[in-house]
Amino acid sequence: MLRRSDVFANLRNHLKAMLGAVLVTGLAGAAALTAMPAQAAKGGDVVKVRLGGDATQTRIVLELDKSVAAKLVSRENETSRQVIALPDIDLDKTMSGQGQGLVSDWKIEDMAGSVRLKLNFTSGAKIYRRFLLPPADGVSVYRYVIDIVPQGTEKTPDAASQLLATVPVVASAPVVSEMPVSTKGRKKVIVIDAGHGGKDPGAHGGDTLEKDVNLAAAKALRAALEKTGRYTVIMTRDTDSFVDLPARVRIARSANADLFISLHSDSGGDGNTRGASIYTLSDSGTERAAKKALVKGDWSQGTPPSDAIVSRILIDLTQRATKNRSATFAQLVMDNIGDSTPLLKSSLRQAGFVVLLAPDVPAVLLEMGFVNNPQDEAMLTDSGHRAVMMGQVAKAIDKYFENNVQYASFAGLN
């Protein structure tokens, strides 16, 4: 990996503070979360609140109808209570309930148009981490999970994961966490996004739905990458479930992803057009992403930087490097899959797709072929061809990193 000069040290630290350094960790439980009595009736976007655990560790889970970029609005060093803002969440009525373990009681209420979760602790406690689970494995809701430990608890992320596994959330979906983590010696993180899913079928072929083709290809790519042992692979979905577009971007950024690949199957015209193509972020998309990063939104910390001019320059530098890496990877993909897959005449394209908007994660959207073209559809639905094609994408990933490309996002550098 190319090392930056000392000149970039301050730039890197500024970006860390602005964009956040975050951790991905997977949790799986063999038993369901022990639930306390909670508000039974749905309150707008809040479906249910569940608690579990004891005075050693406590977990609270908010089941939501939409994704959320929650923000801690109380002081981090408060040990008797904490308040978390839930932007863009609609609440029909105040919800409250008895606590469990380290939580004495909780309340979700709308305060002057801002929905907030208030947690009162039974004794000195702190929030260890917060993360979002998108819908997966038959679960149709988003789950915002908050882990609480006693004040003064000092544990490594791995030890804490084992501790909190006693209060499990059953899921194999990726976990989006808000704790910083060191990237030294870690495997490269690849996020694979199977386009569409659940209530969104995507394009229709003769006998094929795009969402099914995309998921099958994503699983084939995951298998090819995991076989190498060189990568940590995260899927934005690994079942036929719906995950909204901002959540897919949030998963990649929160993972400190080194690469994001969104897999799709094209459709259009009279069915005679065929061939694969690949998209990177367009100039209009770059401007849109910069605005999101500079104001409250999905891909910022929620607090506008104090020096907007300097911050915009830093965002522009980050985006320029990210776009260059994305373009490099896109070319490698086309060079590799062209041996087995027909390509469109103009196969390297640009667009402002939402899934490409992360300013600090190299990202591409690969259109693997046209599902409404009989020849492409036959190839896309053939497991043998998918294995070959995704194997070639995996080789492109190997070459991308072997070429000593500066792949890591600014937010993940140490």
Image (cartoon, grey):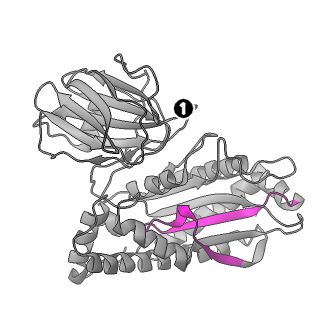
Residues 293 and 162: in front is 293
| Quarter of the view holding residue 308 | bottom left
Q: Position of residue 353 (x, y in %)?
A: 58, 66
Considering only vertical position in the picture, is 37 above or below 24?
A: above
- Residue at 14 percent across and 40 percent down: it is 154
- Residue at 28 percent across and 29 percent down: it is 107
Considering only vertical position in the picture, is 56 above or below 200?
A: above
Image quadrant where one finds the C terminus: bottom left
**Which residues, given as a range, are shown in magenta?**
347-373
Residue 358 included in the magenta stretch of the image: yes
- Residue at 28 percent across and 54 percent down: it is 181
Does residue 409 appear in the picture of this structure? no
Question: Is 185 left, or right, of 229 in this rendering?
Answer: left
Does residue 43 appear in the picture of this structure? yes
Residues 184 and 295: in front is 295
Badge 1: residue crowd in 10 Å (few <14, some 14–19, many ≥20): few
The extreme front residue here reads: 112
Q: Position of residue 165 (x, y in %)?
A: 33, 29
User: Where is mark 1, residue-wise?
Assistant: 139
Question: Is 27 left, or right, of 269 in this rendering?
Answer: left
Question: Is 1 left, or right, of 42 in this rendering?
Answer: left
Disc 1 element: loop
